[in-house]
Image (tube, rainbow, N blue to C red):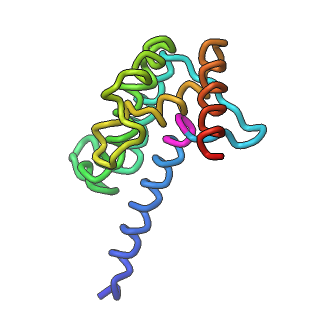
Amino acid sequence: SDGGFEDLMWGVFEKVASLVIECAMRCCVGEGMGAIKREFVPSDANVVREDLKALVVYFVQQDEEEGVCHGLEPKVVKALCKRLDALASQVLLLPTDKLIEAYYTPSTKEVEDGSGGDVLCRSNIVGVLSKRGEKEAKDFVKEMRKKNKKAAT
C-alpha cells in the first residue's frame, strides 16, 4: 500500500488545477495588481476559452491513441472550468455598452450566488470594465467606485 500517498497526490493536483483556473478568473475580473495590468477587448473571450481548452488537455493528460486519462478525470476539470467558461462567453464577450446596459438592468444581481449560472452580475461587470481601455468603460468604473466609496462612509 502507498499509505494514502496516491490519494494525497491527486488531491494536490486537483487543488493546483483549481488555483490555476482561479488565477485566470482573477486576471479577467479581479482587482489590478499594481504595475501588472492587462486590458481586454471582447474578442479576448475567445482567447480565454481556447486557454481553458488547453488547461483541460493539460490537467486531464488523455492518451489520444488509447483514450486513457493519465491526469485528473475530465468531468472534474470541466467542472473546475465551468465558471470561467461562463464568464468568457457571457460577460467578457459583450461590448462595453452592452455591459453597462446589463449593469443597470433591474434583474442583474450584485454578486454571484455561487451557483455558477449568474456570472453576469454587477461585480463581474465592473471587474471586466475595469480591464477595458475605452474611455466609456474607464469613466463608468470610476463612477461606480465613487458611488461605492460614498456608500461605505
Is 97 left or right of 73, judged from the image as shown?
Answer: right
Residue 107 placement (x, y as % from top left): 30, 28
- Residue at the image point whose x is 23% and y is 49% from the top: 75
Tell me: residue 149, above or below residue 4.
Answer: above
Tell me: residue 148, above or below residue 89.
Answer: below
Is 142 left or right of 41, judged from the image as shown?
Answer: right
Is 120 left or right of 64, judged from the image as shown?
Answer: right
Numbered range of the magenta stretch: 25-29
Residue 31 placement (x, y as % from top left): 62, 41
- Residue at the image point whose x is 26% and y is 49% from the top: 74
Which one is nearer the viewer's eye here, 82 or 129? 129
Residue 85 placement (x, y as % from top left): 36, 34
Q: Which residue is farthest right?
A: 35
22 inside magenta stretch: no
Which one is nearer the viewer's eye here, 37 or 11? 37
- Residue at the image point whose x is 66% and y is 32% from the top: 146
Q: Main secondary structure of the magenta part?
A: helix
* Numbered circles on residues, count: 0
26 inside magenta stretch: yes
Which one is nearer the viewer's eye here, 139 or 146? 146
Is 123 left or right of 59, judged from the image as shown?
Answer: right
Residue 80 placement (x, y as % from top left): 35, 49
> Which part of the image, by quadrant, shows the N terminus?
bottom left
- Residue at the image point whose x is 55% and y is 17% from the top: 41
For residue 99, what is the image quadrant?
A: top left
